């Protein structure tokens, strides 16, 4: 249907692995790796793979994972199974509803499921591979939709994340790149990445998220959380947090995003950018509370791409699988420069076409008309922009 050619003047690589798609967190768990299968179905059916270098990624090695994570934690992930968890840690068997989260963060949010290590090592391997393609100048834009698991800590699983592929990828970029800008548009705060690079000026972390301390996970990321307070610490001011209320719409988000990201890039002059595209910031997300449409979400990707800086693009959250797939397929088209030529009507012949019927067989259903009222005022948004400008004034040369 669509004739899609390779982008002129730059190379895009797509890193994926079917080994990630077929794992299950559990029946009721909102994280569905199957959304990656839906994404792949759209990417292939539109013929977008013909415009990219496509790699089936390999699992990250234990040493690669241990570049950030604590050895004992990597060992734990490697050996734990749903069968042996209670033998290994009898204290976890506290009651009928299962284990409490005390051992390395496992619990209801981060369950031990069959093939957990296979899942983690494969999504992490894809992000590491993608980062290396950028370092070797074999790609200008590298994509791993299975990555973006931004909550994982050095020795703790958190918020559906076990291994922090973003931190591992940034560590690869830092071997060559002096300054890496991390941008996170998942509806949740990118706390694991922020924490890992809190005390360095070689990575600047910017997260946009719903913020409501004690109510919305993970409860961190207020506007005044900008890095270590001590004046001698190089990380001071190298973290930007953009806390938001429910219901932000495409217009407000685009205005805010551009007015935060443009001055940040001008002042910081990153030599590589990592963009986490968590799709739980879309309207109608099962866990989210924003009002973005597929195009509003994608505008962030277009805007970052327009700076022509080497870019690693990863996935993240996203709990209404068909809309996650729409967003990431649309964003793939933006990255290969095919968004204007793609037919918004979904391809006639594609696997899982029925999964998209609910909102209509289009890439761009209306996702903004739901129960969430926009609780972000013009004044809130202007206050954030002023705060960021002031913060950036302290890091200007
Ligand atoms: O950013 O809010 C929490 C923590 C709790 C409430 C939920 N219970 C189970 C544990 C304690 C305070 N957790 C969040 C985590 C959100 C992670 C987002 C990841 C990312 O998008 C990146 C990938 C949370 N929100 C909703 C749930 N957990 C949740 C909803 C439904 C269920 C089913 C499975 C498990 C228990 C019942 C669960 C978690
Ligand atoms: Ca975020
Ligand atoms: Zn999220």
Image: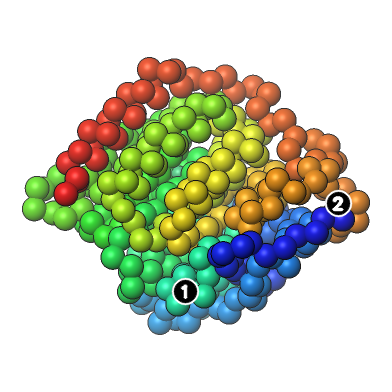
Q: Residue 39, position in %: x, y?
A: 71, 56
Camera-nearest label, 1 or 2: 1
Graded by Cα atoms within 10 Å as few (under 14), some (14 to 19) or many (20 or more), the crowding at tag 2 reads some
Q: Could you say which is closer to the camera, residue 396 or residue 197?
A: 396
Q: What residue appears at the point 59 percent right and 36 percent down from the top-left corner?
A: 296
Q: Residue 325, position in %: x, y?
A: 70, 50
Q: Is mark 1 within 8 Å of ligand 2?
A: no
State whether residue 70 is above or below residue 233.
below
Q: What residue appears at the point 65 percent right and 76 percent down from the top-left corner?
A: 56
Exactly how many numbered labels are in the figure? 2
Tell me which corner region of the image, top left, top right, bottom left or bottom right, holds residue 82.
bottom right
Residue receiving disc 1: 137
Q: Could you say which is closer to the camera, residue 151 or residue 294?
A: 294
- Separation (CA) of disc 1 from disc 2: 33 Å
Residue 246 badge: none
Q: Callout 2: helix, strand or loop?
A: loop
* Residue 343 visible here: yes
């Amino acid at each position: 249907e669509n004739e899609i050619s390779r982008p002129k003047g730059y190379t895009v690589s797509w890193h994926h692995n079917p080994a990630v798609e077929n794992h299950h967190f559990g029946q009721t768990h909102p994280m569905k790796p199957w959304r990656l299968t839906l994404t792949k179905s759209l990417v292939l059916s539109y013929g977008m793979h013909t415009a990219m270098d496509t790699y089936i990624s390999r699992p990250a090695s234990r040493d690669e994972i241990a570049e950030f994570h604590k050895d004992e934690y990597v060992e734990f992930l490697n050996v734990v199974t749903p069968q042996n968890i209670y033998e290994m840690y009898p204290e976890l068997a506290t009651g009928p509803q299962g284990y409490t989260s005390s051992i390395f963060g496992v619990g209801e949010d981060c369950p031990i499921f069959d093939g957990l290590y296979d899942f983690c090592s494969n999504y992490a391997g894809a992000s590491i591979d993608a980062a290396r393609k950028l370092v070797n100048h074999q790609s200008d834009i590298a994509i791993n939709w299975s990555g973006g698991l931004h909550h994982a800590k050095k020795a703790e699983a958190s918020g559906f994340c076990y291994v922090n592929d973003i931190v591992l990828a940034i560590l690869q970029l830092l071997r060559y790149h002096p300054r890496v800008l991390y941008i996170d548009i998942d509806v949740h705060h990118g706390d694991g990445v922020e924490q890992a690079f809190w005390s360095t000026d070689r990575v600047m972390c910017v997260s946009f998220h719903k913020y409501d301390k004690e109510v919305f996970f993970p409860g961190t990321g207020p506007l005044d959380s900008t890095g270590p307070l001590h004046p001698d610490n190089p990380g001071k001011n190298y973290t930007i947090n953009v806390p938001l209320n429910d219901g932000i719409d495409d217009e407000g988000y685009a205005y805010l995003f551009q007015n935060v990201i443009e001055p940040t890039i001008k002042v910081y002059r990153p030599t590589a950018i990592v963009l986490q595209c968590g799709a739980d910031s879309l309207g109608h997300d099962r866990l989210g509370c924003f009002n973005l449409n597929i195009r509003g979400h994608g505008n962030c990707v277009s805007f970052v791409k327009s700076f022509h800086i080497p870019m690693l693009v990863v996935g993240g959250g996203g709990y209404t699988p068909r809309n996650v797939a729409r967003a990431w397929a649309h964003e793939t088209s933006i990255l290969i420069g095919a968004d204007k030529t793609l037919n918004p009507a979904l391809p006639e012949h594609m696997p899982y076409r029925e999964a998209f019927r609910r909102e209509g067989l289009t890439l761009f259903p209306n996702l903004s008309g739901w129960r969430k009222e926009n609780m972000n005022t013009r004044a809130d948004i202007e206050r954030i922009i002023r705060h960021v400008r002031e913060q950036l004034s302290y890091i200007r040369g």
